[in-house]
Amino acid sequence: MSRAGINGDLVNHLFNFPESFEKLMFPSQEHESNENKGVLSIPVDILDTPKEYIFFMDVPGLSKSDIQVMVEDENTLVIRSGGKRKREDGEEEGCKYLRLERRAPKKLLRKFRLPENANVSAITAKCENGVLTVVVEKLPPPPKSKTVEVAIS
């Protein structure tokens, strides 16, 4: 197997990637609790670089104050929003919408199990132009153990 195939399998295993992205949302849609009814899973791209993991999420119409990024249970990255997209009101009296197709979800929620080499104390996030970017730094690899041969007397 090529090195890229091995690395891809490792990343999939570390992030616990299932065959479909719907299974990444906790709890699963099959066992949805009352608390999470109406929750929308945020589309995400995850980039694995040598020094960090970068998450890109589309959050159109939401500002940075509408979004929460936190770590739960020591290794679960949680991105959520209870904010609603604001509709533009007509500037003149008598304006009304003729069509409303862009429905804003009540809540946005996404959870990711981070790999062991994720530095959860060094996570940054920024929201620009409707895209939330979360950067999770990687911890340096542990030093390789040295083998010391001891002479037997």
Image: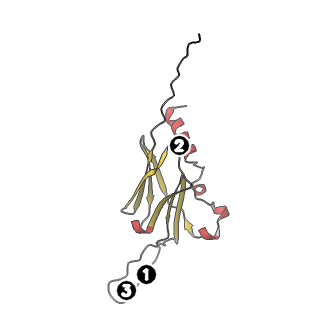
Of the two numbered discs 1 and 2 in the rendering, the one whose residue sits closer to the viewer:
2
Where the N terminus falls, by quadrant?
Answer: top right
Neighbour tally class for label 2: few under 14, some 14-19, many 20 plus, Cα within 10 Å: some
Residue 62, visible in the rendered structure: no
What residue is pinned by disc 1?
Answer: 98
* Residue 21 at x, y percent in the picture: 56, 54
* Residue 76 at x, y percent in the picture: 54, 54
Please tell me which residue lies in front, 25 or 66.
66
Neighbour tally class for label 1: few under 14, some 14-19, many 20 plus, Cα within 10 Å: few
Residue 51, visible in the rendered structure: yes
Q: Look at the picture and state if 110 lies above or below 143.
A: below
What residue is pinned by disc 3?
Answer: 95
Which kind of residue does numbered mark 3 sit on?
Cys
What residue is pinned by disc 2?
Answer: 11
Mark closest to the chain's N terminus, 2 or 3: 2
Q: How far apart are marks 1 and 3 (CA)?
A: 9 Å
Where the C terminus falls, by quadrant?
Answer: top right
Q: Which residue is drawn at 42% across and 66% down?
A: 60
Secondary element at image label 2: helix
